[in-house]
């Protein structure tokens, strides 16, 4: 992928759109996050777990973006409809995040499962990652359909941005768990985080809505 100096600002914009979307979707209380946090607290196979989760997300994101781009390439009206649906989804997601901010929760590391081999731990990571239907809804369908709306030569920037979000978040959970665990146990911290997620999702929904309306 070659990026000229004239398209550099757009490339950075698309990268940060992917990064913001990825962070907004992945930063939520869930079993996968709790599992990575637990491994970090136990200091057990942290690197392989973080790498596996990040790579799995990257593969699913790339497959979603490239697959949706191919499927929608000859169907501009369908692409606009999916963009519109994506904007609605992000707006609803943002609203839910703001509602969560009013009733903050906690992220607790799962108990048990100590002393497992690397193979067993990676099997658990695969289960938490690949057997969760929300993973496919978020990474393949939603991120894929939004990434497919980007210019063909710059879709890699979007994929890189969304994948970077996964790598950053899982690294933060795994390697920063000793510091993050007390912070995540405070509902007030989640109130702030969910508030930021809600605002971000509304901004992304507005950008996607503008793109969708331009196709009609």
Image (tube, helix red, strand yellow):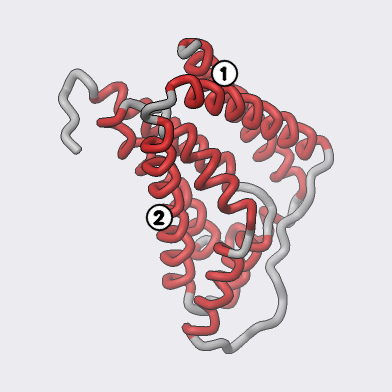
Q: Mark 2, mark 1: which one is toward the viewer?
A: 2
Residue at x 67%, y 31% (from the top left corner) = 94
Q: Contact (CB < 8 A) between labels 2 and 1?
A: no
Q: Which of the numbered marks, if any, corresponds to residue 84?
A: none
Picture quarter containing residue 147? top left
Give the image location of residue 59, x and y in percent: 40, 55
Question: Image check: 98 left or right of 56?
Answer: right
Give the image location of residue 16, x and y in percent: 41, 32
| Residue located farthest toward the front when viewing the structure as drawn | 74
The secondary element bearing badge 1 is classed as: helix
Q: Is residue 132 visible?
A: yes
Residue that badge 2 annotates: 59
Q: Is residue 204 visible?
A: no
The secondary element bearing badge 2 is classed as: helix
Give the image location of residue 117, x and y in percent: 51, 88
Q: Residues within 10 Å of mark 1 (few under 14, many from 20)?
A: some
Give the image location of residue 104, x and y in percent: 79, 44
Quote the CA–CA distance across marks 2 and 1. Answer: 27 Å
Residue in front for this viewpoint, 79 or 164: 79
Residue that badge 1 annotates: 206
First in sequence: mark 2 vs mark 1: 2
Please determine whether, in this image, residue 2 is positioned above or below residue 127.
above
The quarter of the image holding the N terminus is top left
Residue at x 63%, y 32% (from the top left corner) = 196
Residue at x 42%, y 31% (from the top left corner) = 72
Q: Residues within 10 Å of mark 2 (few under 14, many from 20)?
A: some
Residue in front for this viewpoint, 200 or 67: 67
Residue at x 65%, y 83% (from the top left corner) = 113
| Residue located farthest toward the right when viewing the structure as drawn | 103
Residue in front for this viewpoint, 204 or 101: 204
Number of residue marks = 2
């Amino acid at each position: 992928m070659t990026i000229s100096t004239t398209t550099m600002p757009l490339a950075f914009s698309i990268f940060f759109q992917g990064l913001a979307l990825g962070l907004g979707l992945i930063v939520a209380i869930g079993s996968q996050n709790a599992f990575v946090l637990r491994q970090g607290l136990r200091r057990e196979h942290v690197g392989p777990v973080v790498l596996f989760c990040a790579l799995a997300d990257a593969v699913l994101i790339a497959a979603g973006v490239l697959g949706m781009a191919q499927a929608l390439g000859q169907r501009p009206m369908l692409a606009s409809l999916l963009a519109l649906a994506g904007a609605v989804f992000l707006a609803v997601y943002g609203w839910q995040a703001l509602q969560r901010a009013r009733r903050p929760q906690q992220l607790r590391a799962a108990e048990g499962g100590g002393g497992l081999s690397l193979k067993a731990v990676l099997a658990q990571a695969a289960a938490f990652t690949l057997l969760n239907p929300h993973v496919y809804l978020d990474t393949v369908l939603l991120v894929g359909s939004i990434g497919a709306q980007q210019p063909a030569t710059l879709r890699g920037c979007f994929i890189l941005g969304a994948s970077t979000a996964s790598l950053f978040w899982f690294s933060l959970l795994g390697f920063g768990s000793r510091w993050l665990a007390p912070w995540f146990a405070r509902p007030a911290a989640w109130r702030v985080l969910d508030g930021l997620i809600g605002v971000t999702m509304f901004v992304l929904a507005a950008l996607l809505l503008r793109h969708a309306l331009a196709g009609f």
